[in-house]
Amino acid sequence: MSTDTLTPGPLADEKYYGLTADQIDRLGTELDALRQRVIADLGEADAAYLRKVVTTQRKMEIAGRALFYLPVIGWLPAVACLSVSKILDNMEIGHNVMHGQYDFLGDPAFNSRMFDWDTVCPGEQWKYSHNYIHHTFTNIVGKDRDVGYGILRMDPEQKWHPYYLGNPLYALLLMTFFEWGVALHDLEVENIVSGKRKLADNKPLYPGLIRKIRRQAVKDYLLFPALTGPLFPLTFAGNAVANLVRNVWAFNIIFCGHFPAGVASFSEEETANETRGQWYLRQMLGSANITGSRLMHLMSGNLSHQIEHHLFPDLPARRYPEIAGEVQEICERYGLPYNTGRLHQQLFSVFKKIMRYSLPGGQAKAAPVRGPDAVTEDSLAA
């Protein structure tokens, strides 16, 4: 067995559980093979699944819009149906289609370059900040702007400032208006405030952003309420509540996949000259899953399998539950953690972080060093 250790970075041995460079390369080879096996199996079953979800989403939206015409008794069912529709559109359809997970179908309706979702964030802008920045530099403090979204302090490596005393309030506001936070993410307001970015740098983003905001506002808060005539105020309120439900749900799922206890963060120095295996390892250590029912996985867009998503962002998310057991087995064989828990458990640990990092200091819990002798040739070959 090779005893070459991971370089560079003084914390590399701790952060990467003492795996040797050779072991990490073999880990990458195993995960590449798993990805290729799934790709080779993609086909009609995946297409049928997506079309079934889209059909369900459209039926829920139609039902929700129709129920708003029933005064009082139809309002709650309308909001419920519309909320489900918006969640499905955002999580299982929009997020996954725009990741390119269904580009293999050759269907323009589900092509990542052409699809856009039912939120105020333009798809093209989201794909840059999310698909490229976040998935390339996952949990690298200073490069992954999803660490705190430029608003929150979620890691001890983020320098504390009295501003962060408002962490709990900012988190509440971000959760309430999450689609707006996502929409404004590319503007990098925090970098404008710090002087790292100029207002003029955002000029190319304004036309698409304004156009998308206008379209969504007219649809949800003018057109559909107006179509219900005297019920306009109830329909307006119902659309607002459905958007709120979608925002709160999306925030909770995403934060539970990225920021619960046990999720690692990384520095730019540690991840310099990263190999494919090291990139895979960072995704595994920097993500967390949520256990639950098939319905919960569907409503989360299978981002309840955030570890698998970060490993294979371009595979159809419906495949994540199928391979989760194998990914967990690989983690166990290499002596790596597989961070998973119930929604309420992960959420509780996230909010503990939000509260803790509102104050000065804070120290990330170091990963236990397993050492090269913790992973034997026999265990890897098993």
Image (spheres, rainbow, N blue to C red):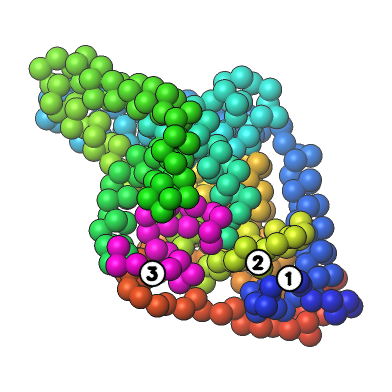
| Real-space CA distance between mark 3 and mark 1, rounded to the nearest whole angstrom | 27 Å
Residue at image mark 1? 8
User: Is 337 rendered above or below residue 222?
Assistant: below
Q: Which residue is painted at 66% across and 53% down in the image?
A: 311
Q: Is residue 153 magenta?
A: yes
Q: Give the residue type at disc 2.
A: Glu
Magenta span includes 273: no
Q: Position of residue 321 (x, y in %)?
A: 60, 51
At x 79%, y 76%, the residue is 5
Going from the N terminus, do you reach mark 2 or mark 1 first? 1
Q: Is residue 322 left or right of residue 167?
A: right
Q: Which residues are magenta?
A: 141-163
Contact, mark 2 vs mark 1 (Cβ under 8 Å): yes
Residue picked out by circle 2:
269
Secondary element at tag 1: loop
Q: Name the residue type under label 1.
A: Pro
Residue 238: horizontal and vertical position, in percent?
21, 32
Magenta part mainly helix, strand or loop?
loop
Which of the marked residues, 3 or 2, is nearer the chain's N terminus? 3
* Separation of marks 2 and 1 at Cα, in angstroms: 7 Å
Q: Amino acid at mark 3?
A: Trp
Q: Which mark is residue 160?
A: 3
**Quarter of the image where the C terminus is located:** bottom right
